[in-house]
Image (tube, rainbow, N blue to C red):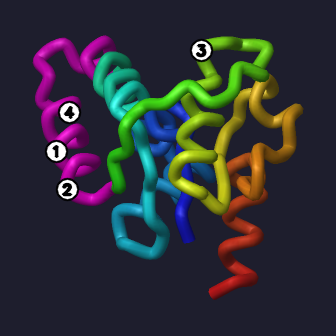
Amino acid sequence: MKIILDTNVFISGIFWSGSPHQVVALWALNKIHLIVTKKILSEYLHILHKIDSKGDIAKKWGTFVLENSQILEDKELVKICRDTEDNKFLNCAIIGRADYLVSGDDDLLCLKKIGSTKIITPSKFLKIHGKQR
């Protein structure tokens, strides 16, 4: 199963417990496959550096993403999200043919789907993943 994590889910999954953490844990255990573009990875790292000024966490997770994800080139295929910064996740979904885009962002969730990729919350993803195992 191929997924995309929006930045808030990725960051929340690293630092806090709850549904985002459980989704990140599934990826870390190789139960699901993460797809990112260079722009998405850059945003992940930017936020991690803001949280951890020493950069240790960003370095650790940046390396983990590089070694355990499919990294795609950025392409602008669609510009349909009301928050234009979120279009990178939609484009990644199309390019990578992801099964799910996991997000807590209403600007993405309101779209429900992009191509064959369903856009759902972390808790809904966990329910679906639990049924498919």
In this rendering, would 125 be left or right of 65? right
Q: Which residues are magenta?
A: 48-69
Circles 1 and 4: CB atoms closer than 8 Å = no
Q: At 45% from the left edge and 75% from the top edge, which residue is drawn?
A: 31
Distance Cα–Cα, label 1 vs label 2: 6 Å
From the top left corner, tell me how far across and down residue 38 is, in percent. Answer: 34, 32
Earlier-in-chain disc, 1 versus 3:
1
Which residue lies under the disc numbered 2?
Answer: 67
From the top left corner, tell me how far across and down residue 106 is, in percent. Answer: 80, 27
Where residue 85 is drawn, which disc sits there?
A: 3
From the top left corner, tell me how far across and down residue 108 is, in percent. Answer: 75, 31
Earlier-in-chain disc, 1 versus 4:
4
Where residue 63 is drawn, which disc sits there?
A: 1
Distance Cα–Cα, label 2 vs label 3: 25 Å
Q: Nearer the viewer, mark 1 or mark 3?
A: 3
Q: Quadrant of the N terminus?
A: bottom right
Q: Nearer the viewer, mark 2 or mark 4?
A: 2
Which residue lies under the disc numbered 4?
Answer: 57
Which image quadrant for residue 110? top right
Q: Nearer the viewer, mark 1 or mark 4?
A: 1
Q: Is residue 1 magenta?
A: no
Circles 2 and 3: CB atoms closer than 8 Å = no
Q: At 21% from the left edge and 30% from the top edge, which residue is drawn?
A: 58
Distance Cα–Cα, label 4 vs label 3: 24 Å
Mark 3 residue type: Glu
